[in-house]
Image (cartoon, rainbow, N blue to C red):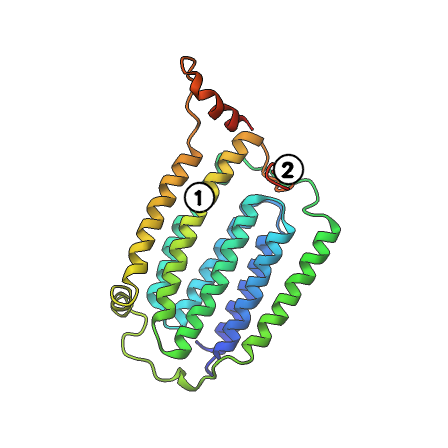
Amino acid sequence: MPLWLFIFLAALAVLSALGVILQRNAVHCLMALVLTLLDIAVMFIGLGAVTVGFLQAIVYVGAIMVLFLFVIWLLNLQVEDRPPAHLALKLFGSIGAAALVAELCTFVVKAPSTAGLSRLPAGFGSIGSLAESLFTDYLIAFEMTSLLLLVAVIGAIALARRPAPARSESAAAMPEKQIGSL
Amino acid sequence: MIVPPSWFMALGAVLFAIGVAGVLLRRNVIVMLMSIELMLNAVNLTFVALSRALGSVDGQVIVLFVITVAAAEAATGLAIIIAAFRNRETLNADELNLMRW
């Protein structure tokens, strides 16, 4: 990846990430997040991770962000009119974030150099090389993610489902209703 | 000039800190979830940069897992938000304080 492209993408990523946390309207926050994610996807492709970059664009931007958008639309969110946070919280949050950047960057200094950057195995980042690793070394983890997705889907449906209409004939449903009304 | 991987990691650190600041500063739970997604992506960027630096594809496989977990987390989190909004009619994290000690 050429230097000018990295600087452009990095500036765009930081600006749009700031847009995510600074804008009042949730839809604008989401659009800024979409821009950040697409920006990172382009960076992935520039780093040789072509498959992961496209998956990022398709799965993240295409599916997860649309899910967020549907929820915002479903809940009919309005622009927040109250101040976003208390002043002390704002102060400590900003100081904490700045300290985190400083701390992480001290580790970055010790990162590996560019020595191995020039030589890459053929087909690096292609679907084939990913699949070879995914279905041998990470097979158990891969199967676990399918279980995780299944549980997440069932959990999401169970949580978001409108509660069943009150059954008058069963007194046993009362404790359940009380919990739900809390 | 080839961009050194530490620059990508520094960018990842900045994006992660912006996500942390979003979780701390914003009171809208949906925006807090978006900030969590931002943090996950900052870590993904670090993984891919190191995968490139080390010439190993393992980092990219872990990014796939992170994307999967992020999808599960977003689905469950948004379902919880819908259920909470139905009961409390608010998305302000300060008002969703039933389980606060």
- Residue neighbourhood size for the residue with mark 1, other residues' Cα within 10 Å, grouped as few (<14), some (14–19), many (≥20): many
Quadrant in the picture for residue A128: bottom left
Of the 4 image quadrants, the one containing the C terminus of chain A is top right
- Residue neighbourhood size for the residue with mark 2, other residues' Cα within 10 Å, grouped as few (<14), some (14–19), many (≥20): few
Query: Residue A40 appears at what percent x and percent y?
Result: 46, 63
Q: Are marks 2 and 1 on the same chain?
A: yes
Q: Which mark is residue A107?
A: none
Task: Report the front residue among A148 and A178.
Answer: A178
B37 to the left or right of A129? right
Q: Is residue B98 above or below residue A94?
A: above
Query: Residue A132 appears at what percent x and percent y?
Result: 25, 68
Of the 4 image quadrants, the one containing the N terminus of chain A is bottom left
Q: Which mark is residue B95?
A: 2
Name the residue furthest bottom: A115
Rounded to the nearest angstrom, the CA distance separating label 2 from label 1 is: 20 Å
User: Mark 1 = which residue?
Assistant: B76
